[in-house]
Image: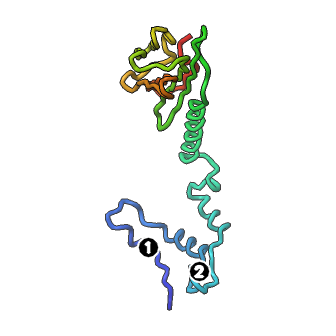
Amino acid sequence: PEVRVGTMAEAPNPGSDAPAPDPAMMEQLMKAMGGGGGSGGGEGGGGGMDMAALQAMLGGLGGGGGGLGGGPEAEMRRQAQANQAAQAEKNSGEADGGADGKAYKWEQTSKYGESEIIVRFPLKTPVTKKDVKVTFKAKALLVVVAGEELLSGATFGTVSVDDSTWCLVEKGSELQLLLGLALDEKWTSLLAA
């Protein structure tokens, strides 16, 4: 059977605003892929794709030498890498805090452009929810357990009060706070200096 290679110049996609393919370019592409004549690269055919010719041909179409050059794609790639680095910095792990024997650990996590901070207070004796009083404010935090103030002060950044909560775990031997952050930015400490 005869294989016909058309130019498609007269048949753009119906309803599409895209221009018709360049006939010369299509012919070059078909030749590079081994389909320029009747001996195409199908089953039993001796054709095939000449990658060097295809890469050389695409280099003039904004491929930028295999995608290593500039242009919008490279800028998007650089921005994605910068975003990944910033997210990794926000997810840097747990840090110690506290003073005067009132220790806590805190950790910031960031995912999908939203950050939160988890603060963990190990308690000497188990407590119930009646023993805990936590006050979340946009720029301040107060934690009192069994009448003892464990944390009080201005926060490093702005807290989203509606997205913050607390809970007791380990049968009341640990208090955990979840602070929803108003902005997805790195906190270098839990409390303002």
- Residue 136, image x, y percentages: 41, 17
Mark in the foreground, 1 or 2: 2
Q: In the shown orientation, is residue 155 left or right of residue 46?
A: left
Name the one closer to the observer, 134 or 32. Answer: 134
Q: Which mark is residue 59?
A: none
Residue 179 versus residue 34 in the image, above or below: above
The residue most toward the bottom is: 1
Colour scheme shown: rainbow
Q: Nearer the viewer, residue 53 or 155?
A: 155
Q: Is residue 77 above or below residue 6?
A: above
Find residue 37 and report its image quarter.
bottom right
Question: Secondary structure beneath disc 1?
Answer: loop
Q: Position of residue 186 (x, y in %)?
A: 55, 25
Q: Amino acid at mark 2?
A: Gly
Q: Amino acid type of disc 1?
A: Met
- Residue name at image x 63 percent, y 56 percent: 66
Q: Nearer the viewer, residue 116 or 45?
A: 116
Q: Which mark is residue 41?
A: 2
Sequence order check, earlier mark of 1 and 2 = 1
Question: Tag on residue 8?
Answer: 1
Question: Quick one: 47 or 186, which is closer to the camera?
Answer: 186
| Residue visible at 41% across and 24% down in the picture | 165
Marks 1/2: CA distance? 20 Å
Using a 10 Å C-alpha cutoff, classify the residue at mark 2 as few (fewer than 14 neighbours), some (14 to 19) or many (20 or more).
some
Q: Where residue 130 sits: x, y (%)?
A: 39, 17
Q: Position of residue 172 (x, y in %)?
A: 48, 24
Callout 1 crowding tier (Cα within 10 Å): few <14, some 14–19, many ≥20 = few
Quadrant assignment for the C terminus: top right
Identified at 60% across, 8% down, the residue is: 100
Residue at x 56%, y 46% (from the top left corner): 71
Helix, strand or loop status at disc 2: loop
